[in-house]
Image (cartoon, helix red, strand yellow):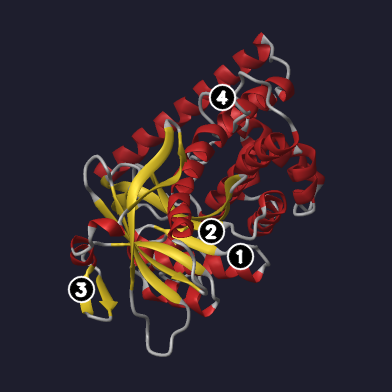
């Protein structure tokens, strides 16, 4: 499976050297390294210095967007399903300083508060057999796009203009659908549920959606316009049904659900409703605006709503197993290339796990192979032979020389600024 995937993307590299280096790079992302960056990867594969591995994401000749397209085709080929769900979600990586591309103080779910962070929006393909990221967009705040010198220093393209996170999600969804991705639904959190352009584009394409909205969202009904939480409070007890939103680590996730028919724009087609979820333990309510080209049962909407969690699961696995968030790069091109190679490594694990579950009978008393277990086994089978003491000593000397030069440079810069 790994050979098939790397052969699929091999043609995106103009020369054999970056092609081989990219393969070694991805193998290292799948290795059990305590930290994954160009230094540790270069030491792991046996290079004398990190220069070659630093060259791959920064200056080597290859197109990360073309590799991303290959990843998307690979995932859809093996996980494809007519009722698949496209999940739009974002994740943030905490950063220090101000020079890393796209970084600023902003709200990120990773920290649960406003922090100095870099935020990216991802498109996840989610089907009953597995889920993996098939596209990504780096969010560049307005504070960056209004400062062309800062953008130029980070390698951001001259023609890039500010775009909101929902607009980036809309572009990714449209690009995937235009490329022939088979999906019937789109789901996302409140950031995307509150954007009218995203829902309008999905309705135009006759793609169903279940998008989270705030409890204060005005909802049009035949009786008038009411806030979402007010509609929920008016529902009779018989309107609620206990249904599972899917399986979790500790069993199936059961909630109480209700559905309220709502009005659409004049002349609009399709069926619209407000989906209300109630936590059986805390009583907390959550609301989603739903659309489908034809009538669907409540169970279908609940299933789609439950798929939104696969976005978070994808981030957790890609970061924990493939180093998605461990990049130490500052520039536009380097970020996209590192992220793409991490997506490729994670897609390999997801597809391998899916194929294993569908083609092999799990013996009684054993859990099916997970992505984490496949990563451990794969790392054990393909890891290069242990490097000798001379290699480790050489790398120790290289690191210390580099650290000494960096320390001297920092002190000289500080002295120059104070004088």
Comparing marks 3 and 2, which lies closer to the viewer?
Answer: 3
Say if mark 1 contacts mark 4, CB within 8 Å: no
Q: Can residue 94 be seen in the rendering of this structure? A: no
**What residue does disc 1 label?**
176
**What residue does disc 3 label?**
226
Left or right, residue 15 beside residue 138: right
Q: Report, in whole angstroms, how far the alpha carbon at label 1 lies from the one at label 2.
A: 9 Å
The location of residue 394, given as percent across then percent down, is: 62, 17
- Residue 250 position by quadrant: top left
Q: Residues within 10 Å of mark 4 (few under 14, many from 20)?
A: some
The location of residue 57, given as percent across then percent down, is: 61, 46
The location of residue 83, given as percent across then percent down, is: 59, 59
Say if mark 1 contacts mark 2, CB within 8 Å: yes
Left or right, residue 277 beside residue 199: left
Q: Can residue 106 be seen in the rendering of this structure? A: yes
**What residue does disc 4 label?**
33
Please count the marks in the image: 4
The single residue placed furthest to the bottom in the displayed view is 267
* Residue 18 tag number: none
């Amino acid at each position: 499976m790994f050979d098939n995937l790397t052969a699929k993307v091999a043609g995106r590299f103009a020369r054999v050297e970056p092609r081989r280096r990219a393969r070694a790079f991805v193998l290292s992302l799948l290795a059990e390294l305590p930290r994954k960056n160009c230094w540790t990867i270069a030491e792991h594969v046996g290079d004398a210095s990190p220069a070659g591995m630093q060259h791959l994401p920064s200056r080597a000749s290859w197109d990360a967007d073309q590799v991303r397209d290959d990843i998307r085709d690979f995932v859809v080929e093996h996980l494809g399903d007519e009722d698949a769900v496209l999940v739009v979600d974002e994740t943030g990586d905490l950063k220090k300083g101000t020079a890393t591309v796209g970084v600023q103080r902003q709200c990120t779910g990773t920290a649960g508060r406003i922090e100095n962070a870099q935020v990216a929006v991802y498109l996840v393909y989610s089907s009953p057999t597995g889920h993996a990221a098939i596209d990504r967009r780096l969010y560049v705040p307005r504070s960056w796009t209004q400062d062309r010198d800062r953008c130029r220093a980070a390698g951001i393209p001259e023609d890039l203009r500010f775009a909101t996170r929902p607009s980036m999600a809309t572009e990714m969804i449209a690009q995937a659908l235009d490329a022939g991705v088979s999906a019937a639904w789109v789901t996302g959190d409140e950031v995307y549920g509150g954007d009218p352009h995203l829902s309008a584009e999905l309705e135009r394409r006759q793609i169903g959606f279940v998008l989270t909205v705030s409890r204060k969202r005005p909802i049009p009904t035949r009786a008038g316009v009411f806030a979402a939480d007010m509609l929920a409070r008016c529902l009779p007890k018989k309107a609620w049904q206990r249904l599972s939103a899917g399986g979790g680590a500790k069993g199936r996730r059961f909630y109480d659900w209700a559905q309220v028919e709502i009005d659409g724009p004049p002349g609009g087609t399709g069926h619209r409703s407000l989906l209300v979820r109630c936590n059986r333990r805390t009583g907390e309510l959550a609301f989603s605006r739903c659309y489908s080209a034809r009538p669907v049962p409540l169970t279908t909407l609940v299933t789609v709503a439950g798929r939104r969690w696969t976005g978070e699961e994808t981030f957790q696995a890609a970061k924990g197993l493939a180093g998605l968030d461990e990049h130490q790069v500052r520039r536009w091109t380097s970020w996209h290339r590192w992220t793409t190679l991490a997506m490729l490594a994670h897609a390999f694990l997801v597809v391998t796990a899916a194929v294993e579950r569908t083609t092999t009978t799990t013996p009684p008393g054993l859990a099916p192979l997970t992505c984490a277990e496949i990563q451990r086994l794969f790392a054990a089978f393909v890891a290069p032979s242990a490097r000798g003491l001379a290699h480790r000593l050489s790398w120790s000397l290289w690191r210390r020389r580099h650290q000494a030069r960096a320390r001297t440079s920092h002190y000289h810069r500080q002295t120059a600024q104070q004088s």
